[in-house]
Image: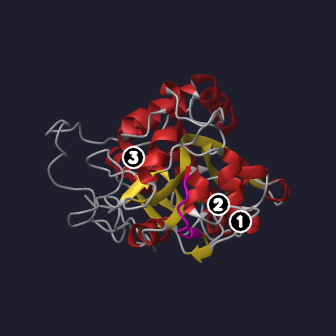
Amino acid sequence: MRKYWLLLTAVALMPLLLAGCPQKQAGTTPPVTGPAPKGEPSTPTPPTSTLSGTIRISGAFALYPMVVKWAELFRRENPGVRIDISAGGAGKGATDALGGLVDIGMVSRAIHEDEIKKGGWWVPVCKDAVFPTMNGKNPVAAEILKNGVKKDTLAGIWLTQTVTKWGQVAGTSNGKPIHVFTRADACGAAETWAKYLGKKKQEDLHGTGVQNDPGVAEAVRRNALSIGYNNLNYAYDAQTGQPIAGIRIVPIDKNGNGKLDPEESFYGTKDDVLKAIGDGRYPSPPARDLNFLCKGKPSGATLEFVKWCLTTGQAECGAAGYISLPEAKAADALRKVQ
């Protein structure tokens, strides 16, 4: 019987997902064969699907880990399907999809009206959020972690540049300068962050531009006076559920009262953060839907993969560090693929 192999190809490294120990980088992933992963049946039911074809996917770093997991599981049920995946930012995913270079673009922001006019067809597939991050050795970390930071202060850092010293952030006399990082590549994280700060666009954000999510996390980790922003799965360790070693999450003082109230204090672990996103305690934006974008309604293996992600695949979101779609939103999305 002729065997087909799954090839998952990424253009970007993800060295920070398991900080402090050797990392599995986002490169070529071996075919899905051999013993079942721990916790899964050792003798899975042999697949009976006759579905075949190749699905090409590119785009958002935010969605990449989830889609890799989905592809592995989908491939077990459908070994005749090959899935090629690369991460390069939401802008690249949208451009590739609308240009016919890939079948699915991973887009970690709202779909633009001009993309719809170009024939874009899209569905939300899960949810995550963007978080402000600072170095673990920040000189005013204790004050920030206790009181949080107001949205107006964050806007002063990235938009108006009126907040330039760490003492201004923490309400102290500390005169150390803030080293601000932003994304250099067109991405959903930056667009979502700008929208939260003042209904702005990515190009309105000031700071030193750095390529991709892992790049921003590494820049923040190396600089004690830095501040940046990252998608959830690049801010928290995939194994421990704690913030990446060397990085602290900047808590948001959502109600602006100058202190971090109990309902605003949930940044210690990934599980706590996921609950806060799900129940609305973390603001939206920067919480947001993650989307699949195609050039017209997909067909064949691509359509079946999208359906699978909206049904069976939703059960995998929590373990992978994402929020599954609310039942009503998932139902709406499924109606689009019928």
Name which residue lies at 57% across and 67% down.
178
Mark 1 closeness class: few <14, some 14–19, many ≥20 residues within 10 Å: many
- In the rendered image, residue 208 lying in the magenta stretch gets the answer no
**Amino acid type, label 2:** Ala
Name which residue lies at 43% across and 72% down.
223
Examine the image and state in which quarter residue 161 appears: bottom right
**Amino acid type, label 1:** Leu
Earlier residue among tags 2 and 3: 3
Main SS, magenta region, reads loop
Position of residue 222 relative to residue 57, above or below, is below
Q: In what element is the residue under mark 2?
A: helix
Q: Is residue 293 left or right of residue 41?
A: right
- Label number found at residue 190: 2
Is residue 180 or residue 167 the one in the foreground? 167
- Label number found at residue 74: 3
Is residue 12 or residue 219 the one in the foreground? 219
**Amino acid type, label 3:** Phe
Is residue 54 or residue 141 the one in the foreground? 141
Examine the image and state in which quarter residue 201 appears: bottom right
